[in-house]
Image (cartoon, rainbow, N blue to C red):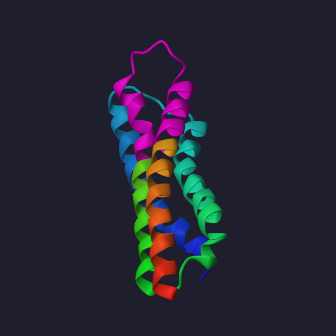
Amino acid sequence: MNDYLTSLLFYLVPANMIAITIMFLGRRKNVHFHFIEYLFIYLPWVGFIALTVVIFGSLDAVPSMPVIKIFLLILQSIGAGVMGGAILMPRLVMRDSEMHPIAITAISATLITVLYVKFRMMLFIMVEGLSSAVDS
């Protein structure tokens, strides 16, 4: 199976579970989400893919050691999914805000994605150094 598809599948499970839970909780508190807000939960996965392409060249070029490949593709995709699902949480906290709801979600998505990519960049640089040290 393609590494991009594997990564997306492992991203979708936690992201959708958390996002749907937040949406149901929001319905109880009279917070209604727009469809466009749901699409924002995919932003961390796009950041994850972009960072992987920048550091490694492509997901297929990730070091071929099975432990590193599983760690990067599966665990990091699940971690990004948890972050992606949590993007909708500020809407519940700021439900009485005068700010437009889509703006709240867009700001939340941007901040969470930037933080995720920042910390993952440090990790990926360490993995790249580790894989080059092992290959030598």
Vertical placement of residue 113 versus 129, above or below: above
In terms of depth relative to the viewer, which is nearer, 54 or 131?
131
What's the residue at 37%, 41% (across, down)? Answer: 22
- Left or right: 51, with 13 as reference point: right
Q: Position of residue 6 (x, y in %)?
A: 54, 74
Identity of the residue drawn at 38% across and 50% down: 18
Q: Which residue extends farthest top?
A: 98
The image quarter containing residue 88 is: top left
Residue at screen point 41% across, 63% down: 78
Whether residue 75 is visible to the viewer of this picture, yes or no, is: yes
Magenta extent: 84-112
Residue nearest the viewer, comparing 97 with 27: 97
Q: Is residue 32 left or right of residue 24?
A: right
- Please give left or right for residue 41 compared with residue 53 in the image: left
Residue 27 locus on image (x, y percent): 38, 33
Q: Which of the image's four quarters has the N terminus?
A: bottom right
Q: How many callouts does the rendering have?
A: 0
Name which quarter of the figure residue 57 lies in: bottom right
Q: Is residue 108 magenta?
A: yes
In the rendered view, tell whether residue 72 sits above or below residue 26: below
Would you say residue 73 is visible in this rendering? no
Q: Is residue 54 above or below residue 62?
A: above
Q: Residue at x 53, y 30 (%)?
A: 107
The secondary structure that most of the magenta stretch takes on is: helix
The relative height of residue 119 versus residue 76 in the rendered view (above or below) is: above
* Horizontal and vertical percent position of residue 100: 54, 19
Q: Position of residue 51 (x, y in %)?
A: 58, 58
